[in-house]
Image (cartoon, rainbow, N blue to C red):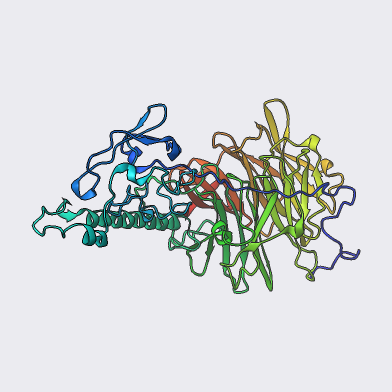
Amino acid sequence: MAQSPERPPYSTLEVSERDPETFQKEVLQYPDHSIPQAVPLEQAAAGATQSYYSPESAKEVINPPQNVYAGAGGIPGVYKDPNGFAYQNAAAYPNGVGYPTGPGYGDVTAYPNSAYPNSAYPNSTYPTSSGSPVESNAYGPSPLTATEQGSQYPPPDEKAAPAATICGLPKKTFFILLGVGIVVIALVAGLAGGLASKNNSGSKAVDQSGSSGSSSGAGSGSPKDPASTNSTEKLILDNSKVTASNWTDPSGVVHRTVFFQDAYNSIIARRWDSDSKSWTTNNLTELMAATTMPLNPQPGTPLASASMDHNPTFETHVWFTDPGNIIRSMASFDALNRPDSWDNDTLDGAVLETWPGGQLAAMWQRCWGADCNGTWVVAYQRPEGAIKTANSSTWATATVAVESKDVAANSSLAIIPQLRGPWLDRLELVSERVNSDRTGSMRLTNYNDTWNGADQRVTELQSDIPLPSPTQQFAATKWANWTQALYIALLKGGEIQGNYWDGKQMNTINSFKFNSGPENNFTAIAMSPDAMFYGISNDEILEYSLDTNDPSNFNYVGRVFP
């Protein structure tokens, strides 16, 4: 076993006391309480699109009917305000006296979702009338109760004309059945919509495609794709990013996790392992929806992830930004035994603010010895422009890695571990520098115990690439015991360029081949540390393995999602 350095153990990322995060702030999100107004039933029938109300006291009855008994077919007269304007659709009996129960006759149960008690129009922002001030005797004698009939009038003739019907049913029965039918239809439609949404972004679903493969190019699972569908429904957010990480458990089973945003802006985790050879879904946003710390990611948020496999600790973390450009995190703190359990990683309360639209990169940095778990490292661009790295030993104090003068605004980022002799405790950071008003360069900066003097440890990878854009992204991976590396860039327009370190020198790769698989047009890319490539193309996430004998080739493995 290699000997430890002569000096005592040290933190692999120094804490800069001169450069703390300068402020803390809390971002509050307020829900939208706007409630649309409903159009009353009688006005909707006349083509109205808005709800209008006038005080009952400003109305009077014109042309009162001679017979006001409901059974005799009398129709109440129209309203008229003091200026002479007639309300043709107003009901003369606002409280529905003498009319059968049903919509439009004052039955409050016709609108069960009303926000106001006893309201016939549930979504109206106006309070309902507590009763008409018009004298009831203004309409003539009121309909009488059975008691009054017995005391003042002879009993009704049993041979009187039958009551009016609708479709052969009494009016009251017809309207009751109609209301029940409408409620049943609404419930069925709502249930169908809810099930469709859950199928698209459910908290857990298994895809038996078994698409993930090994870095040698031979698939470790069947490359069969899920059955195609004729649905045109979008499944992945148009500007979603993608990130991936991997780890190996004590039994030698390889685990991979791919993160992205679905069409509903939820953060989705797709997990695969070489034992089951199947993909499993966790909707992290849905899992946290009912908690006191629900997720609220930016649409198209930058995504970064990393995994730890330092026995007995096995974890997977993902980082993203909220609408205030503050870095947030979710983690599976026991990925080996409880892979479906995800919790908020609070970053010890640190407030790490990014450049609006800036990218993220992350990794797990190992210790040089075997007596610690190492640290999580996240690279991001600060609002003043510098690239910083924050680590889990002191989240609140980030260190400048690349000065603002040496980096482009909204620079793409990638980060990967680097060997220091036998120890994997250093790292490499990829970012972009501005060359002119039209082009930039992709650069590799080495961390060597400190970021001090990092501008003297820079390797030029790609020169004269386009300036940063929302679709431009960097990715990196290594193989052959971390001695060979590939650094790639997805440029505007979908072109991919990169560089290959063969262990002795850096080689430029101007184009890549994606062998087999569907036609691709990548809008987002990522690579896991075990030389697997993931890309979003045509509303799908595709998986390829790197041909390590010819790093300009990627071999199709399968579809990760859907």
| Residue nearest the viewer, comparing 448 with 27 | 27
The quarter holding residue 173 reads bottom left
**Above or below for 334 versus 378:** below
What is the residue that sits farthest to the left in this orientation? 159
User: In this picture, is 374 found above or below 262?
Assistant: below
Taking the image as drawn, is residue 479 in sight?
no
Number of callouts: 0
Left or right: 424, with 63 as reference point: right
Q: Does residue 22 appear in this view?
A: yes
Quadrant containing the N terminus is: bottom right
Against 265, is 159 above or below? below
In the rendered image, residue 210, in percent from the top left (x then y), is placed at 46, 62
How far from the left and from the top, in percent, is residue 271?
A: 54, 62
Give how far across and how far down residue 272 sits, in percent. Answer: 53, 63
Residue name at image x 66 percent, y 40 percent: 357
480 with respect to 231 (left or right): right
Residue at point 49%, 69% (across, down): 276
| Residue 139 higher or lower than 229, as above or below | above
Residue at x 82%, y 46% (from the top left corner): 400
Q: Is residue 328 left or right of residue 22?
A: left
Closer-to-camera residue (510/490): 490
Nearer to the camera, 212 or 190: 190
Residue 37 x/y as whole percent = 46, 42
* Quadrant of the snapshot with the C terminus: bottom left
Left or right, 162 with respect to 419, comes to left
Query: In this view of the protein, which residue sits in the foreground, 549 or 392?
Result: 392
